[in-house]
Image: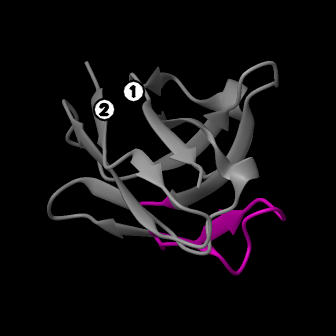
Amino acid sequence: QVQLVESGGGLVQPGGSLRLSCAASGFTLDYYAIGWFRQAPGKEREGVSCISSSDGSTYYADSVKGRFTISRDNAKNTVYLQMNSLKHEDTAVYYCAFRWGIVTMFGREYDYWGQGTQVTVSS
């Protein structure tokens, strides 16, 4: 059973930075994707970024391009989301998710989800 544990959320001022971590466990095969998704109050869940374990290919939502960077440490089975120049509209619960196979930004394609970590951008 794949398990995901997110960490790194918190309160930050506009323009500040946070780094989220997603530690994955419970699997041995090395062909999977991990995505970050977020959901703000009253809004639908949206894909933020995702990364492939095999070739490291990455994808970003237009709203975070140039500000967020996703990276992986395969030895630790951990994926990071570095978030810079944070804006009020980045406030949401951030979830990481896992799927076997190719990387995709569609949340419905992911099979396992973490519990989420709150990110609040406020002055």
User: Secondary structure of the magenta portion, mostly?
Assistant: loop
Determine which of the numbered discs, if any, sits on residue 114 in the image: 1
Q: Is 1 placed above or below 36 here?
A: above
At horizontal 25% and vertical 18% (from top left) the residue drawn is 1
Q: Is residue 80 visible?
A: yes
Determine which of the numbered discs, if any, sits on residue 17 in the image: none
Q: Please provide percent x and percent y for residue 27.
A: 22, 35
At horizontal 31% and vertical 49% (from top left) the residue drawn is 8
Where residue 39 sits, quadrant-wise, is top right
Q: Is residue 101 visible?
A: no
Task: Work out whether mark 1 precedes mark 2 in sequence or the reverse, and give the earlier one.
Answer: 2
Where residue 62 sits, quadrant-wise, is bottom right
Q: Is 75 placed above or below 105 here?
A: below
The local secondary structure at tag 1 comes to loop
Q: Is 44 placed above or below 27 here?
A: above
Look at label 1 and name its amino acid.
Gly
At horizontal 74% and vertical 73% (from top left) the residue drawn is 65
Q: Is residue 123 magenta?
A: no
At horizontal 58% and vertical 29% (from top left) the residue drawn is 110
Which of 3/82 is in front?
82
Answer with left or right where residue 11 lies relative to residue 23.
right
Look at label 2 and name its amino acid.
Leu
Give the residue furthest to the bottom: 66
Q: Please provide percent x and percent y for residue 32.
A: 44, 48
Label 1 crowd (10 A; few <14 / some 14-19 / many >=20): some
* Residues at discs 1 and 2 in contact (Cβ within 8 Å): yes
Answer with left or right where residue 25 lies relative to residue 123.
left
* Residue holding disc 2: 4
The stretch of residues the image draws in magenta is 52-70
Label 2 crowd (10 A; few <14 / some 14-19 / many >=20): many
* Mark-to-mark CA distance, 1 and 2: 5 Å
